Amino acid sequence: MFSKVLVANRGEIAVRVIRACRELGVTTVAVYSELDREALHVRLADEAYALGGQTAAESYINLDRMLEVISESGADAVHPGYGFFSENADFARAITELGVTFIGPPPEAIEVMGDKISAREAAERVGVFGVPGTTELITNPQQVLDFGSEHGWPVAIKAAYGGGGRGMKVVADADAVEAAIESAQREALAYFGRDEIYMERYLSNPRHVEVQVLADAHGTCLSLGTRDCSAQRRHQKLIEEAPAPGIDQSILDAMGQAAIDVAIGCGYTNAGTVEFLYEDGAFYYLEMNTRLQVEHPVTELVTGIDLVEQQLRVASGEALSFGADDIEMRGHAIEIRINAEDPAEGAFLPSPGPINKLVAADGFGTRFDTGYESGDEISQFYDNLVGKLCVWGSDRDTAIRRAVRALDEMVIEGVATTIPADRAILTADAFVANEHSTNWVENTLDLTGVRSAASAAPESEEPLVERTVPVEVDGRRFDVKMWVPEQAAAAAAPAPQRRSAAASSSSASGGGSGAVTAPMQGTIVGLKVEVGDTVSAGDAVVVLEAMKMENSIDADIDGTVVEIAVAEGDSVGAGDLLVKIEA
């Protein structure tokens, strides 16, 4: 086993890995940006090093600085978590060249499966096929137009070097092609550092089912069962469950074998996930994620297998200590992603800001994985996941009831969250009856009146007289406990901030006035109008990126654009004027 593991990530997944390492007696090293100086993963690690910068590009995906820190820390292994460098073959190869172990698959497997086009080809070589699609990158809109004419609309444009719904746009018809290409490339570049895209036929009402695989370096590759991830918005998962319900066992077994075939075919080791789309009794290969998935806890809950522990053991050269016959699925598990977003009746608007109070649900079969505590802040520059509420039940109905109970116990104040939408999903007849699909939340579920009001916790009456202050020495972080005067401690404590939930995906405070304002903090990535243009209420005028998601901000009245108050690349706050329209 390793002596020191550096976790090249932040938030919930960094905390998850740090805890697993500590249980195995492994020293942990955290890394942090300027914004994460006092983050939970930093507080929990044995050591911590500053990356500098604020955005992901300046910090967590700054390859040169990350490699420097790995060397400085003396770590003998690196766990990438998910996102950031987790599916970056160059990163894995650079670590290996330093003599440090990458806790994940070989760089060659990442390259094959990380490129979604070569991944399709690799799957087809072992007899596993996806929906109709191309093996060529999109270089001009005409390719999409030709594909749509041949195979029919809608068409999915997807990031070739990404996953998780980032950089994916569904094109309904020929008129939307150019805008979709531009948006997909922007998101892919922002989240994965590369903007290559490809396309495939978009199924209308599929289920999203994935298989967890685990492979060691001694020739053993196992399937640890399925997960259903069909409750999604913007092609990003909201609720996941294991095992996938309502599908004939013979089909699930075939999926499991197909996943094993794909993993073996690309020389895979460590934990990975093979994803499929399922519709009308048939399943189609979608992609392979060469990393630990966000939703891995539901597999852990039904199998009793700690996947992060297994990742560490496999990477250290150990053989799996169990076989296929030893894996027993017990009961049903559900994971609910609680994001800092206002459901806003289906608009799902990011809500960065301070968490004034966080009290996690508890009880039998209940688990909450998070990277935050009361007093921490959700930054606009990173993913908006507050935490993952996971429950286990003896059957699906029990798990659903337990999930609803646990959601009702959650207390998160200071930011808007998706909890009201999560509850609406879990209690909807279609979800309970397992009749939902990947587009059900956006196209069918009635979220009228479903909003989240961000509230602030009252300021504590107990004055602070003892503080732990982070100090950096040569880029390494140390926590120093200090006693300070009572008044100084109180003055240093951050005052609670109040935020109001955004009203809709269009102008948050325009109210028909023609003053289109920002519904949230973010960055302007696109202007859809010019001064003098005539617009109608509902027309997109600005594209605002917040927490790596693009949001279309719309006109609130019919009229003429008389002022544009922002430019592409500008950072804006909630309520800032973007565009002025006169009737």
Image (spheres, rainbow, N blue to C red):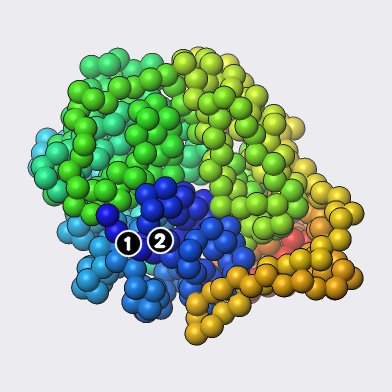
Residue 423's place in the image compared with 295, above or below, is above
Give the mark nearest the N terminus, 1 or 2. 1
Point out residue 6 in the picture as x, y percentages from the top left corner.
39, 64
| Nearer-the-camera pick, 20 or 401 | 20
The residue depicted at 76 percent of the width and 66 percent of the height is 466
Element assignment for label 2? strand
The residue depicted at 39 percent of the width and 74 percent of the height is 73
Amino acid marked by disc 2:
Thr
| Nearer-the-camera pick, 403 or 153 | 403
| Nearer-the-camera pick, 237 or 83 | 83
Point out residue 115 in the picture as x, y percentages from the top left corner.
25, 56
Q: Quadrant of the N terminus?
A: bottom left
Give the Cα separation between the discs numbered 1 and 2.
6 Å
Q: Residue 444 appears in which quarter of the rendering?
A: top right
Amino acid marked by disc 1:
Ser
Point out residue 414 in the picture as x, y percentages from the top left corner.
75, 51
Please state if 97 lies on the left or on the right of 564 as rendered.
left
Residue 544's place in the image compared with 345, above or below, is below
Judge the density around disc 2: few (<14), some (14-19), many (≥20) Cα neighbours within 10 Å: some
Q: Quadrant of the C terminus?
A: bottom right
Please state if 67 lies on the left or on the right of 124 as rendered.
right
Point out residue 46 in the picture as x, y percentages from the top left corner.
48, 63
Q: Which residue is mark 2?
A: 27
Residue 130 can be seen, yes or no = no
